[in-house]
Image (spheres, rainbow, N blue to C red):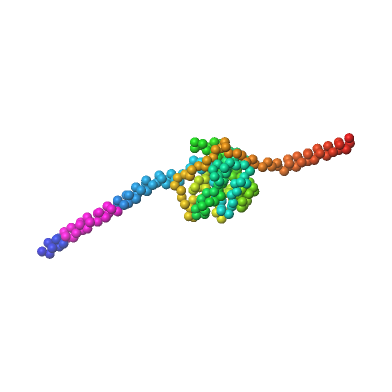
Amino acid sequence: MERVSSGGERRANNQEGRSLRGASMPGRCASWSIAFAIACTLLLAAPLLTTVAQPCPEDLYAVELVLPAEVKLRGASLGAYREVSPEVYAYRSGFDERVVVALYHSPAPPLGTRLPTVRFQVPVEGGSPLFTVSSEELCRAAKLELSRLAAAGVLEGLEPGDIEKLDAACSAGKAGWERRLVLVNGTWVPYSEVPGAKPLLGCRAPLPLSYAEVPTWPAPQQLPLLPAAAAAAALLLALSWKMFKGRRS
């Protein structure tokens, strides 16, 4: 009788265990369904995230710089320009006419909603650049133009030291919402690395730049020191000879 009772208890326990396992199956299925839904969501979102991370076509051939609010942008002080849209000034670089310089204000939260911005753009048509400009050439034109813009009062408050520091960060493709360079505490960093930076889904509308309609701001003509001194000496010699001949006659 004890064996029968023991066997009955085991059967009862087995039945209870099966009923408990059966009762837990809906919960497990629910957990698997949630996990599967999350996995599917991530897989579907992956292409979108990849697309957002890719630079826009025009940005590949540009350098875009966002300056602190302390720097004042005065477009009227430009030597030559075309206002391609309200408060957006553009001209061809006198140091490299293959590069268009555009000046405007742009938001860069949390740093500010209206910050002076300069973009150095190789013109793009149909997704391809009109000219072949290396990254080094583009950055060289950017530095020369920044120095001229600061000296002319167009970018009032931009320090020469900040321009020199651009060498370490500048390269073609540092443009667009995420990759543009922002001057923060004397250091050029991509906007995406700024604490509290707000991501942007998709590309911004390109600037309305027509290369043929943008004037060139000629670069200042500076003779090297030795040729300039030689030219001055030759002019002085010619004047002295003329005066000498006048006295003899």
Residue 12 occupies quadrant:
bottom left
Q: Where's residue 165, x and y in %?
A: 59, 50
- Give residue 36's position: percent from left, percent from top: 32, 49
**Residue that sits furthest to the bottom in the current view:** 2
Q: Height in image: 247 above or below 198? A: above
Total numbered badges shown on the rendered structure = 0
**Residue 211 seen by the camera:** yes
Q: Is residue 123 magenta?
A: no
Q: Quarter of the image for the C terminus: give it.
A: top right
| Front one among 78 and 145 | 78
- Which residue occupies the foreground of this view, 162 or 200? 200
Q: Nearer the viewer, residue 27 or 1?
A: 27
Q: Was residue 19 drawn as part of the magenta stretch in this picture?
A: yes
On the question of residue 137 being in view, the answer is no
Range covered by the magenta-colored residues: 10-31
The secondary structure that most of the magenta stretch takes on is: helix
Residue at position x 80%, y 40% in the image: 236
Q: Residue at left 34%, top 50%?
A: 38
Considering every residue shown, the one lying at the far right of the view is 248
Q: Is residue 33 left or right of residue 113?
A: left
For image coordinates 32% across by 51% down, the residue present is 35
| Furthest residue toward left | 1
Give whichever of 2, 228 is nearer the camera: 228
Can you name the residue that lies furthest to the top here? 249
Residue at the location (35% across, 48% down)?
41
Q: Looking at the rendering, in which quadrant would you find the N terminus?
A: bottom left
Give coordinates of residue 233: x percent, y percent. Answer: 78, 41
